Amino acid sequence: MDWSGSRCFLFTAFLILAAAIDATLADTTVSGTVFCDQCKDGQLSLFDYPVSGIKVKVTCVDSNGQITTSREETTNWLGNYAVKFDGTPNLGNCFAQVSGSEQESTACGAAAGPAQNLRLMFRMFGMELYAVDSLLTQPAHPMSFCSRSSNPNPVSPPVTPVNRPPSARSPPTFNLPPLPPLPPTLFTEASACPHQ
């Protein structure tokens, strides 16, 4: 391949890459999972499982509490949902919450847990990916295998979209133990001799 052929090839590759990047621009996705809180203790535990057919609403409000953007999606059979927005809207004042159930016969849709704030996980080429902490739904009554000694913390009914969720907490920090001292080095001076 001569020089003019390689320039044509590079230019074509650049145009294809630019078109691919342009096609991926302007997409924002919010994703998370909904679990059934079988013991009605208000937290994720060993007995809880992902729930399908649950409606999740992502709501954004302005400084006056007025709804600016709202989208709803249903969980798949693994309890996951993905709400897509066109463009890259400001999702700084947004939250996700369980808003209902697709099937009224869902055993774990009697009550919904608190709303959760969105966390920006990824931003590149105009694409954004937000994650949401696990959302909870609850059955009408706790399961029989749940511990009765603990005081169950039932989840309040769904919050109206105008209310703000609690502020996000910072992740826990861990202190590592001190490292053991390094052994003394045998050779402290550099040598010009080869290893043989």
Image (cartoon, grey):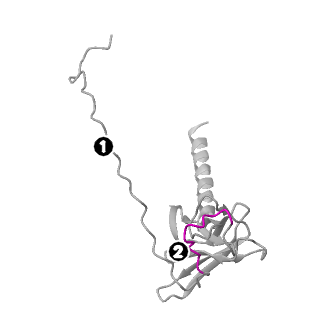
Foreground residue among 118 and 192: 118
Given the image, on which type of amino acid does mark 1 rest? Answer: Pro
Q: Tell me the amino acid under the disc marked 2.
A: Leu
Is the magenta region chiefly helix, strand or loop? loop
Residue 91: numbered disc: 2
Judging depth in this view, the residue of 19 and 89 nearest the camera is: 89
The answer to whether mark 2 and mark 1 are in CB contact below 8 A is: no
Choose top left, top right, bottom left or bottom right for residue 178: top left
Q: Is residue 120 magenta?
A: no
Q: Please report the residue visible at 60 percent of the width from the left and 54 percent of the height from the top.
A: 17
Q: Which residue is drawn at 66% across and 70% down?
A: 142
Residue corresponding to mark 1: 178
Residue lying farthest top? Answer: 196
Q: Where is residue 141 in the image (x, y as percent from the top left)?
A: 68, 73
Q: Let me know if residue 155 appears in the view.
A: yes
Which numbered disc, 2 or 1, marks the residue closer to the eye? 1
In terms of depth relative to the viewer, which is nearer, 130 or 111? 111
Q: Determine if residue 28 is in view.
A: no
User: Which element is circle 2 on?
Assistant: loop
Q: What stretch is highlighted in magenta?
A: 144-156
